Amino acid sequence: MIIGSNLIFVKNLPSTNTHAGHLLKTNDVPEGTIIYTNYQSAGRGQPGNVWESEDGKNLLISIILYPIFLAPTDQFIISMAISTGICDFLRKYIPVCSIKWPNDIYINNDKIAGILIENSLMGDRIEHSIAGIGLNINQVKFISDAPNPVSLKQITGVNYGITACISQLASDLDKRYRQLLSENYSQIRNDYISDLYRLNEWCNFKDSEGIYTGRILSVTDSGRLLIEKKSGIIAEYSFKEIGFIP
């Protein structure tokens, strides 16, 4: 086992990703190390976003990886592997989940998990990656202005053991990371694309030109989203260039 072979618990942290970054600067950290905490005072989502989590209720972890076998141009496959691994975990408890591009995890139209992956590049290789995950487990009341949070307990009515969840999630993520190590990229890509939120559904999107109707077709190897417009034009987007309209 790589992911989860070394666990570091700190009761409270500003951010598990920030703490992981500090460890990498000062220590030789084994690959697959998981840093986890009960509470983050400055939990980070995608740039400009924060992650709300009640003390001791959810999974707040960061995983340190050394994917030096990947070229920087292929770094999005790490996000695909982490996203599909979280879906593997969730499907043990609920029947359906999806990945809202690029890497939010949804149950129907509600967000249950967020991912923040920070890659450090050195020349033509990835020196290290920090995969931060916030996964709502037992929280039932959310007070931030986030529009659509949901937790596993809200869906199932069951209270889950956080330690057991970390162990199971680590196992599921480890299986996906081993697919990367064995260069089984096609399986990860196919699973990621098939799990995409609103895949092949005609719905409304908003880009720099306005609102239009389209459907998600796929994602490029570099992580750009491909959407077919009603006109037949296929548009390609990077992160923050396209918005989903409820």
Image (cartoon, grey):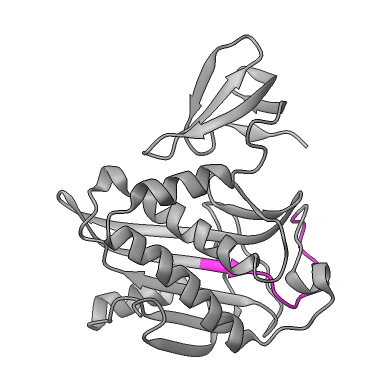
**Residue at left 26%, top 47%?**
72
Position of residue 69 in the picture relative to residue 148 (left or right): left
Query: Residue 102: x percent and y percent?
Result: 53, 45
Residue 10 percent location from the top left of the image? 50, 89
**Residue 61 drawn at (x, y percent):** 51, 75
Residue at the spot x=76%, y=75% of the render?
139
Q: Quadrant of residue 182?
A: bottom left
Measuring 26% from the left and 75% from the top, which residue is drawn there?
25
Q: Where is residue 121 in the image (x, y as percent from the top left)?
A: 24, 54
Q: Is residue 153 magenta?
A: no
| Apparent side of residue 236 relative to residue 120 in the rendered image (left or right) | right
Direction from residue 183 to residue 110 in the image, left or right: right
In the rendered image, is residue 76 in sight?
A: no
Q: In which quarter of the image is residue 174?
A: bottom left
The kind of secondary structure the magenta stretch mainly shows is: loop
How many marks do you count on the picture? 0
Evaluate whether residue 217 shows in this view: yes
Q: Residue furthest top?
A: 231
- At 52% across and 52% down in the image, what residue appears? 47
Chain part drawn in magenta: 133-146
Residue 135 vertical placement versus 121 (above, below): below
Residue with the most extreme left position:
123
Q: Say which quadrant the N terminus sits in.
A: bottom left
Q: Is residue 143 magenta?
A: yes
Most foreground residue, 74 or 10? 74
Q: Can you say whether 20 is above or below 221 in the image?
A: below
Quadrant in which the C terminus appears: top right
